[in-house]
Amino acid sequence: MDGPSHLTRNVAVGGQPTLEDLRLLQARGFVAVVNLRDDGEADQPLPPQAEGAAVQVLGLRYHHIPVVLAELDPGRLCQLRTAIGAASGPVFVHCGAGQRACAMALLATSEGMPVPVDDLLARAAALGFPVRDPKLASFVSEQIERERQRVLQAI
């Protein structure tokens, strides 16, 4: 992990952190880590259970919300919103390289203010996490449309 990319004052995203990265997050005032990786993914130096234990030793909250590209589920987005909303300070959301973390966190933090799909995808790319997976891009589009419809019905 090169360093977290901030989406908001209290939400940052990135790729897989090392133990040293987790210590740096704690030193920078983060209060929670959300891991979107599924157990057993390739290049996973810290499996979710080991990462969770390390995070808790540092005094941070840990949430494991596996997001699998082949099985994208709006329920996972709700879980991420809940984890972010329950935090009393900055939250670091990660996956392997940051693509899922950035897309999901952008969706989670834009609830109630639907943005055009192109804007969200451009923001992810500008942050260094372009959404290249077609399934993830389709999921982003579906969720934005769902939120747009929800907001329109509330008017």
Image: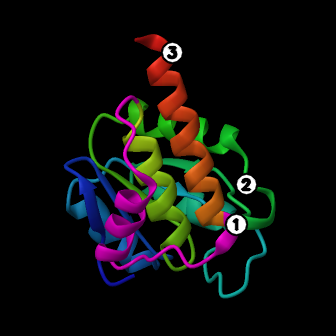
On the picture, is 155 further left or further right than 126? right
Contact between labelled residues 1 and 2, with CB atoms less than 8 Å apart: yes
Q: Look at the picture and state if 139 lies above or below 41.
A: above
User: Residue at the location (50% across, 63% down)?
Assistant: 101
Q: Amino acid at mark 3?
A: Gln
Q: Comparing marks 1 and 3, which lies closer to the viewer?
A: 3
Q: Is residue 85 visible?
A: yes
Q: Nearer the viewer, residue 63 or 135?
A: 135
- Which residue is denoted by mark 1 in the rendering? 135
Instruction: Give the secondary structure at mark 3.
Output: helix
The numbered disc on residue 153 is: 3
Q: Amino acid at mark 1?
A: Lys
Q: Earlier in the sequence, mark 2 or mark 3?
A: 2
Within-10-Å neighbours for mark 3: few <14, some 14–19, many 20+: few
Q: Is residue 131 magenta?
A: yes
Instruction: Name the spot of residue 6 as percent of width and height, x first.
Output: 25, 61
- Which residue is denoted by mark 2 in the rendering? 72
Within-10-Å neighbours for mark 1: few <14, some 14–19, many 20+: some
* Quadrant in which the C terminus appears: top left
On the picture, is 148 further left or further right than 23? right
Quadrant of res 67: bottom right
Q: Amino acid at mark 2?
A: Leu
Within-10-Å neighbours for mark 2: few <14, some 14–19, many 20+: some
Instruction: Name the spot of residue 8 as percent of width and height, x first.
Output: 24, 50
Q: Look at the picture and state if 141 lies above or below 50.
A: above
Q: Earlier in the sequence, mark 2 or mark 1?
A: 2
Q: Which residues are magenta?
A: 112-135
Looking at this rendering, what residue extends furthest in the bottom direction? 43
Q: Nearer the viewer, residue 152 or 52?
A: 152
Instruction: Name the spot of residue 141 as percent of width and height, x first.
Output: 56, 53
Q: Comparing marks 2 and 1, which lies closer to the viewer?
A: 1
